[in-house]
């Protein structure tokens, strides 16, 4: 299965994943089934394939499950027990619709009455099944999900009249990050552009953004504190006359992420912009080993 295309932009990127049905990301309606087999009192059209079992719970005990949706480039769904007197194990399974037997791609359970599952966004058709072991089972509608790459944009600013000294030292970034720089420059040479120099301040801005996305579990060009790429670059003391940024998530190697960017017209334009002279690359891993990538470009 293809991984989501790296986000790139001079301020945009693979920052969204949306259901092809056009619904709002993460706002899918819940599907509710009563635990005792009674028909729902308010939204019967949203009840799907409930298979209740006998129970001594009150008539108000219900198991609900939300159809899978998209939130910050992750597939998300949830299940909840409502109006139930006795505690019970609530299990939720996310299944992918395929020919033959549908595989379970993510599952979880809780006794707290509510559970939310998240998983990396991969294109496909998914549905969720919730089981209350004192009541019944609720199944959501299947929904086709697609990971979308927004069109990147660029931003230019006038250089401040403040001179900037060159960063001391010859070594910038990790071996993995420098491999991204090398492969990026190899592509630029093919198109007649000069190589980019790995700048320590741009690298600091790029790595800081990748690490922040890992720490706070989001994927976007704008930081959760409201800063954009220019704010982050300037915070390192860097000055310049043009700015651009590419981000990506999930690619396993430098070669894979550079190829993903080159396969996208907007991302490729950033890499092949001959006016840029400097680059900063930051790569950070989350707890599952998934890499968040950031490329910052500038001219000076």
Image (cartoon, rainbow, N blue to C red):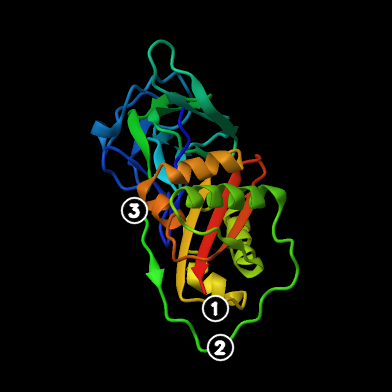
Residue matched to label 2 = 162
Place residue 70 in its image quadrant. Answer: top left
Mark 1: which secondary structure?
loop
> Which residue is at 53% across, 29% downward?
106
Place residue 254 in its image quadrant. Answer: top right
Tell which tag, 3 or 1, sits nearer the viewer. Answer: 1
Q: Extreme left residue here?
A: 45
- Check residue 115 in the rendering and tell me which mark sits there, or answer none: none
Place residue 58 in its image quadrant. Answer: top left
Residue matched to label 3 = 151
Alpha carbons under labels 2 and 3: distance apart: 33 Å
Where in the figure is residue 212, as x and y percent of width and height? 60, 59
Where in the figure is residue 269, as x and y percent of width and height? 39, 54
**In the image shown, does 109 or 210 lie closer to the viewer?**
210
- Check residue 239 in the rendering and tell me which mark sits there, or answer none: 1
Does residue 88 appear anywhere in the picture? no
């Amino acid at each position: 299965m293809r991984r989501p295309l790296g986000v790139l932009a001079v301020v945009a990127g693979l920052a969204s994943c949306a259901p092809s049905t056009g619904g709002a990301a993460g706002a899918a309606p819940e599907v509710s089934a009563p635990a005792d087999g009674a028909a729902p009192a308010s939204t019967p059209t949203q009840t799907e394939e409930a298979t209740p079992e006998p129970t001594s719970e009150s008539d108000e005990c219900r198991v609900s499950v939300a159809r899978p949706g998209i939130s910050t480039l992750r597939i998300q769904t949830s299940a909840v027990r409502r109006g139930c007197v006795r505690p019970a194990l609530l299990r939720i399974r996310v299944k992918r619709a395929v020919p033959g037997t549908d595989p379970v791609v993510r599952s979880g359970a809780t006794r707290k009455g509510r559970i939310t599952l998240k998983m990396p966004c991969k294109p496909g058709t998914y549905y969720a099944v919730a089981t209350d072991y004192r009541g019944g089972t609720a199944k959501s509608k299947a929904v086709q999900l697609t990971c979308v790459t927004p069109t990147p944009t660029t931003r230019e600013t006038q250089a401040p009249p403040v001179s900037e000294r060159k960063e001391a030292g010859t070594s910038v970034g990790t071996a993995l990050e420098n491999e991204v720089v090398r492969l990026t420059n190899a592509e630029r040479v093919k198109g007649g552009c000069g190589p980019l120099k790995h700048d320590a301040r741009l690298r600091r801005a790029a790595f800081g953004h990748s690490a922040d996305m890992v720490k706070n579990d989001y994927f976007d060009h704008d930081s959760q504190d409201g800063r954009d790429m220019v704010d982050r670059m300037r915070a390192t003391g860097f000055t310049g006359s043009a700015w651009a940024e590419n981000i990506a998530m999930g690619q396993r190697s430098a070669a894979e992420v550079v190829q993903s960017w080159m396969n996208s017209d907007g991302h490729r334009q950033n890499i092949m912009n001959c006016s840029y002279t400097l680059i900063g690359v930051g790569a950070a891993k989350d707890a599952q080993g998934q890499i968040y990538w950031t490329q910052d470009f500038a001219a000076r």
